[in-house]
Amino acid sequence: MRADRLVALLLLLQSRGRLSAAQLAAELGVSVRTVYRDTVALSTAGIPIYADPSGYQLVAGYQTQLTGLTADEARGLPLAGLPGAAAALGLAEAVAAAQLKLTAALPQTLRERATRMRERFHLDTPGWYQDADNCPYLAEVADAVWQQHLLDVEYENWKDVAQHRLQPYGLVLKAGKWYLVAHARRGVRTFRVSQIRALTVLSERFDWPAGFDLAAYWQEHIQDFRARLHRGEALVRLDPAAVDNLRHFLGQAVADAAAAGEPQPDGWLLARLPIESETHATREFLRLGPVIEVLEPLTLRDRIAATVAELARLYG
């Protein structure tokens, strides 16, 4: 809408100072000719815009009070530091507008500090070796969370695809992955949004559960996940140089257990490492190559030996 664009242009000049027509056009996503028309319209409306060959600026001392947030802008404000997440939820424009209004409302000294912070710090949530999830239903899920509408979903877990009717309580972004916290048949559960295969937003709404705290639930969920993660252990010999790699591959708890191992005459460590499962441990220990030897359990040692023998046969 043109009215929104005029307000945005005015706030840009208030928060950034002098800007050229080309800079304004790039910020607003319009042509330079449109910027010319919009600045004339603002001047006609009584906004004291000063223009010279280097660009446009507001007359010193002028400050608009048009900084109130719309509903969408207020909704997107918690994502102000997460532009990727805001875009995924369809709130990129609202978040950008909210940031612009907040910046324009700051005193000049604080405005300069906020600008420097934005220019010099950037948050990128996914890990180096992982891409963000492909979540075709994310925007619909987010809207259902916001509007408190029930959802019917087809959800693919590690065994099969199951049908669920959900009361969507909230969304969590962790390491570039989106998770839906929702009430299902067996109580409050966590669903990975990328594993939703079909979704229907129902007209029926639900009441927000009194006392529910999304952050507290998520913290408890993480603690429970970590407690269930390591359900076994393996006795190993390993080169001390492998400890850092264990931290990258298997986490800090496994690396700490390795570092606490008993030194052996040959300089290696004898340690008991927590493992998730023998299947998982086989894959992860093989990634370490010849700097680790599994002694127990024998079934895990035999799995690794069989895999190595197969690799030797394959490569001749």
Image (tube, rainbow, N blue to C red):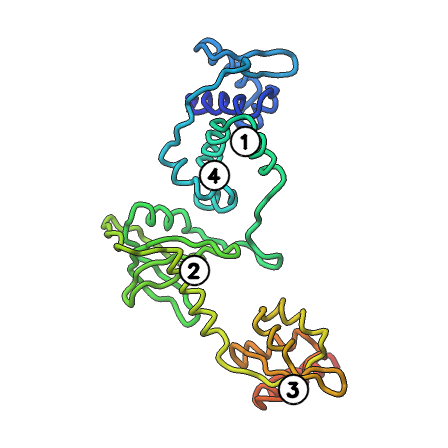
Asked whether disc 3 touches disc 1, contact meaning CB atoms under 8 Å apart, the reply is no
Q: Nearer the viewer, mark 2 or mark 1?
A: 1
Comes first in the chain, label 3 or label 1: 1
Q: CA distance from mark 3 to mark 1?
A: 63 Å
Comes first in the chain, label 4 or label 3: 4
Which residue in the structure is indicated by mark 2?
A: 192
Amino acid of disc 4:
Ala
Where residue 57 sits in the image (x, y, percent)? 57, 16
Which residue in the structure is indicated by mark 1?
A: 110
Figure quadrant of residue 130? bottom right
Identify the image quadrant of the C terminus. bottom right
Amino acid of disc 2:
Arg
Packing grade of label 4 (10 A; few <14, some 14-19, many >=20) is many
Name the residue located 42 percent from the left edge and 26 percent from the top edge.
67
Question: From the viewer's perspective, is residue 182 above or below residue 92?
Answer: below
Q: Secondary structure at mark 3?
A: helix
Which residue in the structure is indicated by mark 4?
A: 92
Comes first in the chain, label 2 or label 4: 4
Which residue in the structure is indicated by mark 3?
A: 305
Amino acid of disc 3:
Ala
Q: CA distance from mark 2 to mark 4?
A: 22 Å
Q: Nearer the viewer, mark 4 or mark 3?
A: 4
Asked whether disc 1 touches disc 4, contact meaning CB atoms under 8 Å apart, the reply is no
Most foreground residue, 179 or 122: 122
